[in-house]
Amino acid sequence: MLLTGTYKRSIDDKQRIAIPKKIRDQIAASAQPNLLYVAPGTDGSLVLYTEESFSRLGEQLAEGSPTGQDVRAFSRLFYSQAESLELDSQGRVRIPPELWQLANLGKEAVLVGVRDHLELWDANRWQAYLIEKQSHYDELAERAFRSSATPNGR
């Protein structure tokens, strides 16, 4: 499943956010179509995963040394704050208060499709991130693809 796009959303007083129908349709084919996992993201965002994507992330993390300090610290911080969420009949999820505060979410938010997961950003923080990063798009692309190149240059 490839998640893409940017979706401006309002967050209600009960800290619920509606998942766009396009995204709900994409995750409907998953084993648990009404289940998402939310966890701390990077750069002040939260991440939302389907069960399959969440499991794949765990598998990637398990490839690291279980005794490595970074692996242990990240695993503790990430998994201790991750929670499963069920979509309600209107396609909304309720963001847990602790994660809501961690991401400093307000009434306006942005959901961003990032390959295998969604990121949830406060709208103002997302706008600031875009302003900071967009002018460096070409340089970021070059470095991103250089770092993912195989050792033999393919």
Image (spheres, rainbow, N blue to C red):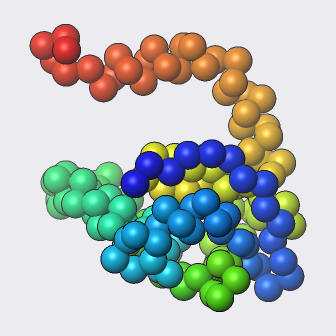
- The N terminus is located in which quarter? bottom left
Residue drawn at x 77%, y 29% as measured from the top left = 131
Note whether 140 is above or below 31 in the view shown: above
| Residue 32 place in picture, x, y as percent | 39, 80
Note whether 110 is above or below 105 in the view shown: above
Residue, far bottom: 89
Residue 65 lies left or right of residue 146; in this view the side is left
In which quadrant of the rendered view does residue 89 lie? bottom right
Observer able to see residue 107: yes
- Residue 143 versus residue 118: which sits nearer the camera? 118
| Residue 27 place in picture, x, y as percent | 47, 67
Observer able to see residue 106: no
Note whether 115 is above or below 33 in the view shown: above
- The C terminus is located in which quarter? top left
Residue drawn at x 57%, y 61% as measured from the top left = 23
Residue drawn at x 33%, y 22% as measured from the top left = 147
In which quadrant of the rendered view does residue 136 lie? top right
Residue 142 lies left or right of residue 135; in this view the side is left
- Residue 124 versus residue 154: which sits nearer the camera? 154
Residue drawn at x 59%, y 55% as measured from the top left = 119
Instruction: Give the number of marks.
Output: 0
| Residue 130 place in picture, x, y as percent | 73, 33
| Residue 108 place in picture, x, y as percent | 84, 61
Residue, far left: 152
